[in-house]
């Protein structure tokens, strides 16, 4: 049966009586639980008066002082104090559910400040070693999340009192629920101005920790939302995170950006200047992939460096697949030149001797059961794809590829290759884009001697 507003008001006197006690007692817990349960009802939340919340605030403040003075060896009293703290946080949490009045009142009374103080104490307490802090920790974080929803002043107060130190500590807690609730609070508080603060060198560790959680805890939805909703809209933050990341974290970041582009390209939150940064990074880093053909190819660092290059390439391919906000990349002549030259280098290395870039006929094996996908898979095919994308409807780029002898190069990469499925199809599309409304390129193809796979392909003959 739901609690009536009058029963909630009756708890005010009971709470006031609890506050008169000099020492927290276990019997006080039931009083708080009754009050917390009543606050689940909307009418009850609306019925709570200022005096009741003032009493609760005094009670919470007393708990805060008591926790600081209670010895960790006094396990019975510490246990009672922690249970009462958790229940007080629950009451605060419930009172703020879809209730702007209570949010404003709790903020004015100072609940945010004392709650942050308790959370900070719990994280520094020796009791943490026994895992007894997790329940009050979770409930306190949930309160911060509920009081912040839809209330900018509460968001700002939480941010001012918790960023960056408390957020960073909470994101490192050895409790998945507490971490998840923390990412919810962080997502709720973030806005454009706060993302700018994240860009500052002393605050970057918070952003890096969020990205680390995206990799290690992919089931935490809030971390993904933070990255896609806030981080990817800030070119400065993406650049500084990327530069401060080890290669494994860079791979995770790039995979997340690629997922955004492929899953919902029309609503992609990636800033256009992030595209420019990734294009620049690709031009600088692309030579790393050639290390796969050397004796050091088995090195984890070499593999991760190569994987970042292939992910950069895949992202650029998606961005230039007629996504309007990113088609400015066609105007970057250095990107096209780098891509053609890299295709030429990779093709030459593969033909020089047997290595990972050589055309393979191993169709019986599959990477599907492997946890690691080789960076060379589809690499040449996607280089050709990017060239074709950059030349689509762009006469200047068509001419540049011709000047770089890129047309015969693409035609020479039409051999069946199990490392590059559909390379012939991408080559056909690229040649189509290179020849469209370009008489000089058409003449180049017409003058070539048909041979190999290209000669046998009806699409090329047409």
Image (cartoon, helix red, strand yellow):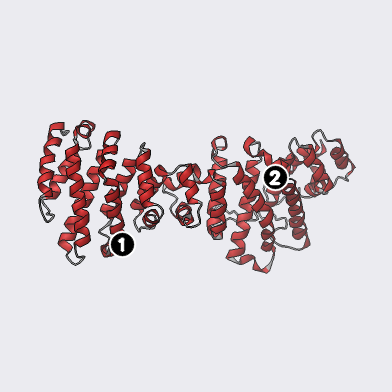
| Residue projecting furthest to the front | 108
Task: Answer whether labels 1 and 2 touch (C-beta < 8 Å).
Answer: no
Dot 1: within a 10 Å radius of its alpha carbon, few (fewer than 14), some, or many (20 or more) residues?
few
Q: Residue 124 bears which disc, if any?
A: 1
User: What is the tally of numbered marks visible in this picture?
Assistant: 2
Secondary structure at numbered mark 2: helix
Secondary structure at numbered mark 1: helix
Q: Residue 386 bears which disc, if any?
A: 2
Q: Is residue 458 visible?
A: no
Q: Is residue 311 visible?
A: yes
User: Where does the C terminus fall, quadrant-wise?
Assistant: top right
Where residue 419 sits in the image (x, y, percent)?
A: 67, 53
| Side of 205 where 3 appears, left or right | left
**In this view of the protein, which residue sits in the foreground, 384 or 53?**
53
Q: Residue 400 bears which disc, if any?
A: none
> In percent of the image, x 77 and y 54: which residue is there?
344
* Gap between marks 1 and 2 measured at Cα: 52 Å
Q: Is residue 457 above or below residue 27?
A: above
Dot 2: within a 10 Å radius of its alpha carbon, few (fewer than 14), some, or many (20 or more) residues?
many
| Side of 79 where 236 appears, left or right | right
User: Where does the N terminus fall, quadrant-wise?
Assistant: top left
Where residue 242 sits in the image (x, y, percent)?
A: 56, 55
> In percent of the image, x 83 and y 35: which residue is there?
438
- Decide which of tag 1 and tag 2 comes sooner along the chain: 1
| Side of 237 where 421 appears, left or right | right
> In percent of the image, x 82 and y 47: which residue is there?
408
Could you say which quadrant of the image residue 261 lies in? top right
């Amino acid at each position: 049966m739901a609690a009536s507003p009058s029963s909630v008001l009756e708890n005010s006197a009971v709470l006031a009586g609890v506050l008169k006690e000099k020492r927290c007692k276990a019997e006080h817990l039931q009083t708080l639980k009754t009050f917390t349960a009543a606050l689940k009802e909307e009418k009850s939340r609306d019925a709570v008066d200022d005096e009741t919340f003032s009493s609760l605030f005094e009670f919470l403040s007393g708990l805060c002082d008591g926790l600081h003075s209670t010895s960790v060896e006094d396990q019975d009293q510490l246990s009672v104090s922690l249970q009462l703290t958790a229940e007080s946080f629950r009451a605060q949490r419930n009172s703020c559910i879809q209730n702007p009045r209570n949010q404003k009142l709790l903020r004015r009374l100072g609940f945010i400040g004392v709650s942050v103080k308790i959370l900070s104490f719990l994280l520094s307490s020796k009791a943490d070693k026994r895992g007894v802090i997790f329940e009050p920790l979770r409930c306190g974080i949930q309160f911060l999340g509920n009081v912040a929803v839809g209330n900018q002043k509460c968001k700002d107060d939480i941010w001012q009192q918790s960023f960056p130190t408390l957020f960073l500590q909470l994101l490192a807690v050895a409790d998945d629920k507490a971490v998840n609730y923390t990412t919810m609070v962080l997502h709720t508080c973030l806005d454009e101005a706060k993302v700018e603060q994240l860009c500052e060198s002393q605050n970057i560790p918070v952003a890096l920790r969020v990205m680390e959680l995206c990799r290690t805890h992919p089931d935490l939805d809030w971390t993904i939302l933070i990255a896609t909703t806030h981080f990817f809209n800030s070119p400065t933050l993406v650049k500084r995170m990327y530069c401060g990341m080890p290669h494994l974290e860079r791979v995770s970041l790039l995979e997340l950006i690629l997922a955004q582009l492929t899953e919902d390209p029309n609503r992609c939150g990636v800033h256009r200047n992030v595209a420019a940064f990734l294009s620049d990074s690709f031009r600088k880093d692309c030579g790393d992939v050639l290390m796969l053909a050397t004796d050091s190819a088995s090195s984890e660092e070499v593999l991760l460096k190569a994987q970042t290059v292939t992910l950069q390439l895949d992202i650029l391919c998606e961005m230039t697949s007629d996504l309007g906000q990113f088609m400015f990349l066609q105007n970057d002549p250095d990107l096209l030149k780098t891509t053609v030259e890299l295709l030429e280098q990779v093709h030459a290395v593969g033909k020089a001797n047997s290595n990972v870039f050589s055309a393979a006929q191993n169709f019986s094996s599959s990477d599907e059961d492997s946890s690691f996908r080789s960076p060379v898979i589809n690499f040449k095919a996607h280089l050709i794809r990017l060239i074709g994308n950059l030349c689509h409807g762009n006469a200047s780029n068509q001419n540049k590829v011709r000047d770089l002898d890129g047309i015969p190069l693409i035609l020479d990469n039409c051999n069946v290759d199990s490392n590059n499925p559909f390379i012939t199809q991408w080559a056909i599309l690229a040649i189509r884009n290179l020849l469209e409304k370009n008489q000089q390129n058409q003449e180049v193809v017409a003058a070539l001697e048909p041979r190999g796979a290209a000669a046998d392909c009806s699409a090329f003959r047409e």
